[in-house]
Image (tube, coloured by chain):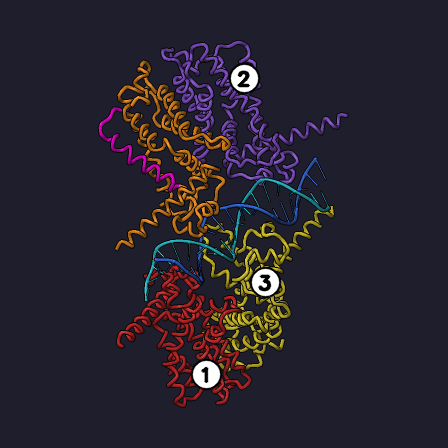
Chain colours: A orange, B purple, C yellow, D red, E cyan, F blue
Amino acid sequence: MGITERREREKTERRRAILNCAKELIFEHGVERIGMEDIARKAELSKATLYLYFSGKEILFSEICEESARAFLKQFKPYWESGLTGISALKRFWRSYVELFGDSNEIVIIFNIRNYLKSWPNNDNAPDVNKQHKSHFVDAILDSMKTIIDQCKAEGTFDPDLDSALATRLILSVFSLILSDAVRTPFEPKNSEDIIREMTIALQIMLRGFAKEGVNRSLLDITNF
Amino acid sequence: MGITERREREKTERRRAILNCAKELIFEHGVERIGMEDIARKAELSKATLYLYFSGKEILFSEICEESARAFLKQFKPYWESGLTGISALKRFWRSYVELFGDSNEIVIIFNIRNYLKSWPNNDNAPDVNKQHKSHFVDAILDSMKTIIDQCKAEGTFDPDLDSALATRLILSVFSLILSDAVRTPFEPKNSEDIIREMTIALQIMLRGFAKEGVNRSLLDITNF
Amino acid sequence: MGITERREREKTERRRAILNCAKELIFEHGVERIGMEDIARKAELSKATLYLYFSGKEILFSEICEESARAFLKQFKPYWESGLTGISALKRFWRSYVELFGDSNEIVIIFNIRNYLKSWPNNDNAPDVNKQHKSHFVDAILDSMKTIIDQCKAEGTFDPDLDSALATRLILSVFSLILSDAVRTPFEPKNSEDIIREMTIALQIMLRGFAKEGVNRSLLDITNF
Amino acid sequence: MGITERREREKTERRRAILNCAKELIFEHGVERIGMEDIARKAELSKATLYLYFSGKEILFSEICEESARAFLKQFKPYWESGLTGISALKRFWRSYVELFGDSNEIVIIFNIRNYLKSWPNNDNAPDVNKQHKSHFVDAILDSMKTIIDQCKAEGTFDPDLDSALATRLILSVFSLILSDAVRTPFEPKNSEDIIREMTIALQIMLRGFAKEGVNRSLLDITNF
DNA sequence: TATGAATGAGTGTTCATTCAT
DNA sequence: AATGAATGAACACTCATTCAT
């Protein structure tokens, strides 16, 4: 009986191992430059074996995003739903983010992939499932963020004229480029600590920009949980 | 004697023609999706001829960035050097930006390319010149921006603790993603007017975030030249 | 001025050379077993070059069929339209066939490919052009055949109850298998003379089977032009 | 002791089950389109298990042909050996054929496979057994047919100049293509009744073609047992 | 006996770049 | 100066077959 379980576990582990190899490669060389061949070699598997675990390159990559997004949501959701104020939720959001990704390069990779996948041609004849699933969880994170921003507006912390959707995208874009820049200079790869520090500063700046005129800055301090 | 000059002029014109074709294609389909073949066809030249004018795809693309950056600097530099305050320079910077790119899709293309080129493999055996030249003028713009931000800090408009380099990159990143997003949705392509509007809002938010505590927001208003 | 012509001619010759290489390979090993790689090697070209002349494997293959079918129609059509009786047309049809393919392995290959292409998955998202063009000329030959059979029925040579469409397919199938069998035994490859002889006998038998009861066999003799 | 027998029986049953699954798939999608994977899935077995029962894809497929051929011979042989005239034997042959395959899709599949297998590379280093066994029983059917045709010739029903081997192949080819055509159009799959009807007509035509000049057509009527 | 997992050897196709003319 | 023609190296993906358990 234990056999099936072990099998199951091993399979999951392999999946994870493959994903990890892919992540490392992505972090080292960038998404655009790695192929199934490379991942296979790194994972010490044959290309064909990869296809036993992931039905295609796109799936493999998006799985990485999903995985992390899932982990993030799992960590963040409970707090969020417990009746926090907008700004507290935002802090909690950031805290979850830091706790989860602060000491790994995960987040670098996620954004890398996300941008990469977006640039792909739309397989119009691909199964619809793909399109729906494409970034279900990643988008959920963005949705959370937008909801929080709306709440901040409602509570008078943020400028009521602020366009929440735009604001969300701004944060995303800032993080995205910080990460991209970090990855793009392979000679002196910034460690995640540095990245997180930059992100924190950036987010802090954005929040000040979002804030309603007159709101005290200490209220917006995301480093003060 | 006039012959050599005419030759020279014709050569320059061809270069421009090619660059323009490339730009149009990039705007229509995105950098990742167009190849030398496409550019050649559009320019009504052979692929081989392209290589007479540009030593490679990378050079061709980066040339587009350079060209625009050059134009921008040319327009902006005079004002900047004439003793403006930091915040005025910033407004002037933005004004130049809008005047130059506000009614064309130039800027979309530039950022598109910039992101694209960054993702390229580093040809370690390529002549060093390439690396240095890679984005000489684009970087000059960023340098200007950074200097202005420094000035704003010095003049007490911006938070003295602000990291100018980071701030510059933030602005760049925000613009970059606004543009990327705009391009990525080819079905309902935003026109440059919309893009500029979003950028203005975003920049405004950033500036508020950059500002020293207590600085009056009206001072930061970039729409009020 | 002659240059463009020469170029044009050379290009056509290359196309032909490639097609011929493909044909030889198909004759020697069968359609299913040869790939673009093989054709390229035989033609002493790179795989990529093949794609300069043919946009894909399917196109390359169907081109072979079309080419022959075109040649056949060109040879046969004039006679056919000049008011022959059905049975004379049939003889003429056969004569054209023999004259054109009697001393080459062309026809073996055509049927080989035809069957092969039929077995391909239908690219439902392929450009519609493909579907229409797929076997325009080959089908024209079959149409001719069917029309002739109809005429023979009308003229009282063939059994009025004969299903012309079925009859056409029967002839096709007989030819097809004679050819397939010929190819499938690579150890003692029958030469085209033998093939044609078998085909003649087979066609003769079919015609007798098609004939209206009582029609004199000498009338049906296709060897007697 | 009974255990070994049961084992044996179960093994045979499994073999049968696998063959049946393969048949269904072949009928639905065509030989070229199905792989070991598909058969395994349908049989609710693992791919590896298939190899316990059949040493390879080729063997599995040819086994299907053999099985049916065996069944046919079993049904037909007794009649044939009981001193029928050639033409009666031919009718009996056809009757057996219809009785056995007339209400199933068996025969479609057999010819499908047969054509498919013929197109395979000759494994020159494969054990010779393979080559010999390849279509032992199917060939036995063809031999029967040839013998009958010879008898018809001897009895004056068929043209004495008729090449029996060729005639046999003709019949085969006609059946083969009727079946192929039937399978190739998966949208409106002809049922076996239609197929048998077409085959009957075709065979009737062939027989007329085979007949000695002057033989009365009613004698050749295969629908009149 | 049965199988999950693995793979080698392919498939067709693309594209930036080069070179003879 | 211009180009048609050619290509190498890469790409994602497939499948019959094997083997440890």
Q: Secondary structure at mark 1?
A: helix
| Residues at marks 1 and 3 on the same chain | no
Q: Which residue is mark 1?
A: D217
Left or right, residue C65 beside residue A170: right
Q: Chain of mark 1?
A: D
Left or right, residue B7 beside residue D219: right
| Residues at marks 2 and 3 on the same chain | no
Spatial distance from mark 2 to mark 3, Cα to Cα?
67 Å
**Three-letter amino acid code at disc 3?**
Leu
Q: Position of residue A169 (x, y in %)?
A: 38, 28
Spatial distance from mark 1 to mark 3, Cα to Cα?
46 Å
Q: Secondary structure at mark 2?
A: helix
Quadrant housing residue D82:
bottom left
Q: Rate crowding at label 3 as few (under 14), some (14 to 19) or many (20 or more) other CA atoms within 10 Å.
A: some
Number of labelled discs? 3
Q: Secondary structure at mark 3?
A: helix
Residue extent of the magenta highlight:
A62-86
Say which of B56 and B50 sits in front: B56
